[in-house]
Amino acid sequence: MQTANAALEMGEQAGVRRKIQSLNPATGDLLAEYEAATDAEVHKAVGSASQALAAWRRLSVAERASYLFRLKELLYARRDEIAALITREAGKPVVEAMLTEVSVVLDALEYFGRRARKFLSSQPVPHHNLAMKLKRGRLEFEPYGVLGIISPANYPFSIPFNEIIPALVAGNTVVLKPSELTPQVGLAIRGLLEAAKLPPGVAQVILGDGPTGQALAAAAIHKLIFTGSVATGKRIQAKAAERLLPTVLELGGKDAMIVCADANVETASSGAVWGAFTNAGQTCVSVERVYVVRDVAERFIALCVSKAKRLRLGRGGDPSTEVGPLIRDRQVGIVEQQVCEAVTQGAEVLCGGHRPNLPGLKGFFFEPTVITRVNQ
């Protein structure tokens, strides 16, 4: 029986290209379809980044920072267009797209452009050993080389850009593989990088899926940055360890909020609801569980339920929308399964817990949900 990788390799050899789809999660409609990069194309991009490295790292920090300022001007001019694109492909309300994606990147471009020279300046290293008093030490910062970045769909613009920006200004070159769920946002990133007239090969974007990411991780890069699931992160780390490839892994967790007896319960409940349902809960540090001191638990829970019930589900382009859809129907299914599992173990659903039955909402929506009496 063929393995999946063998079948993929045979398909590529036969000229059949894997496809990735861009969907509107608020409607389920197909926006566009793209071909995934082949292994050969991934390695070609990494080779181009390697060729560009020597000239790029020779530039002064100020010269590299000038490209960041150019990117900032370009992004600011296109801010509304980019925010609307993020909303269309990732589903989040447009105000969230502007505040948590576009504005964050504008800030990062300014921040690193202004401070990179200070950050990268050599630093004296003092010696405290008497035998070393006549010695001098300095800490020097050197680029890693070619950085591979595999980014997620929950923040498809701000996460990859906030990894690209410091990498570039520090003298590295970059190859980005954006999420296969948000290829149009990936292409928008590519368009901005090209419009900034970065030297050829310095910053590249390759579209693709899981096998594309595997090819990038296996290519001749010098460091890998991955944001995604624990399971995939473990596989990446195991392969990276074979060649001592440095990695930065931001993986999933179950983020807890703690509410103490002396907390302002009104404010704390608003924080919990905001932290839980921003970006439909698809946030790296979203509030996924809450531990509450018994003295204030009843009041806190009642406030959370009341506020969650008032949240308005809808398409991200609607100004009244407060919670948009999840990125794919598969994610809705996972949440349904989690709620069902909790209930079978004795949990109580106080609000939500289902796909909404609202006219016009045929996308990947799930009601804001509060569950109590849950075990560990």
Image (spheres, rainbow, N blue to C red):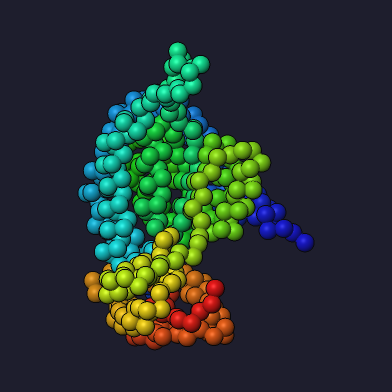
Task: Please name the residue shown 54% across and 56% down the image.
Answer: 209
Specify the quadrant of the image occupied by residue 294: bottom left
Q: Quadrant of the C terminus?
A: bottom right
In the displayed structure, 24 sits above or below 13; it is: below
Quarter of the image holding residue 32?
A: bottom left
264 shown above or below 78: below
Give residue 123's position: percent from left, percent from top.
Answer: 38, 26
The residue closer to the viewer here, 252 or 156, is: 252
Front residue of this view, candidates 348 and 244: 348
**Image quadrant assignment for residue 313:** bottom left
Question: Visible in this render: residue 61?
Answer: yes
User: Along the line of sight, which residue is nearer the eye, 298 or 119?
Assistant: 298
Residue lying furthest top: 134
Residue in the image at 49% along x and 71% along y: 331
The extreme front residue here reads: 130
Q: Position of residue 158 (x, y in %)?
A: 36, 52
State the residue in front, 259 or 323: 259
Q: Residue at x 36, y 67 (%)?
A: 275
For the N terminus, give its image quadrant: bottom right
Is residue 46 among the parts visible in the rendering? no
| Residue 114, horizontal then vertical, whole percent | 26, 36
Q: Residue at x 31, y 39 (%)?
A: 112
Please give the count of numbered marks on the rendered protein. 0
Q: Percent x, y for residue 276?
A: 38, 70
Residue that lies at the very extreme toward the right in this rendered image: 1
- Relative to 204, does residue 130 appear above or below in the rendering? above
